[in-house]
Amino acid sequence: MGGAAENEMVVKQDLRVVSEVRRFVRLISGQWDMDDFVPCLVASELVTNALRHASEKDGDVILRLGRTEDGALWMEVQDASYELPHLREADVISEVGRGLFLVDQYCRCWGVRALAGNAGKVVYAVIDAAYPS
């Protein structure tokens, strides 16, 4: 992103707050005249993964939103778990395992970077301002 995040939300360790995450993303993407469907989907998946895989002792999850130089949305989700996310193949009856597949399909790019000193990680995603119809 280059500089400090333009918008930040601290997400408490409670899966019920994911709806608040979507409201926050809608608010920000609306200010940027951006459709909110994909940003809300990606934020929901990344925050839910962080909340599911980080323990209470790891503390809160942080969601950051900003813009790239070409107007895309830059999203970061930071947590204190050092377990790195990875794409996996879900079987047809599984109720889990498709989140990162969706992120991969809808984002220009996504990735993860570890924080220094095993302090956790940041998962980022770049979402184009306009999506193909």
Image (cartoon, rainbow, N blue to C red):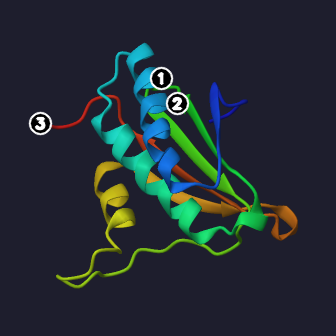
What's the distance in space between the residues labelled 3 and 1, CA to CA? 22 Å
Q: Residue at x 30, y 59 (%)?
A: 102
Q: Residue at x 59, y 71 (%)?
A: 53
Q: Quadrant of the N terminus?
A: top right
Q: Residue at x 23, y 35 (%)?
A: 131
Q: Which mark is residue 77?
A: none
Q: Quadrant of the C terminus?
A: top left
Q: Residue furthest left?
A: 133
Which of the two residues, 38 or 53, is positioned nearer the viewer here? 53
Classify 10 Å Cα crowding around label 3: few (below 14), some (14-19), many (20 and above): few
Residue ID for mark 1: 28
Assign a secondary structure to mark 2. Answer: loop
Instruction: Residue 87 in the image: state x and y as whole percent.
Output: 41, 74
Can you tell which of label 3 and label 1 is closer to the viewer? 1
Residue 43 in sight here: yes
Which of the two residues, 56 or 97, is positioned nearer the viewer here? 56
Of label 3 and label 1, which has the lower sequence position? 1
What's the distance in space between the residues labelled 1 and 2, CA to CA? 14 Å
Instruction: Residue 69 in the image: state x and y as whole percent.
Output: 52, 26
Of label 2 and label 3, which has the lower sequence position? 2
Q: Are marks 3 and 1 in contact (CB under 8 Å)?
A: no
Which of the two residues, 132 or 11, is positioned nearer the viewer here? 11
Q: Amino acid at mark 2?
A: Thr
Q: Which mark is residue 68?
A: 2
Image position of 90 with respect to 62: above or below: below
What's the distance in space between the residues labelled 2 and 3, CA to CA? 22 Å
Q: Are marks 1 and 2 in contact (CB under 8 Å)?
A: no
Q: Is 103 displayed left or right of 125 in the figure? A: left
Residue ID for mark 3: 133
Which of the two residues, 38 or 132, is positioned nearer the viewer here? 38
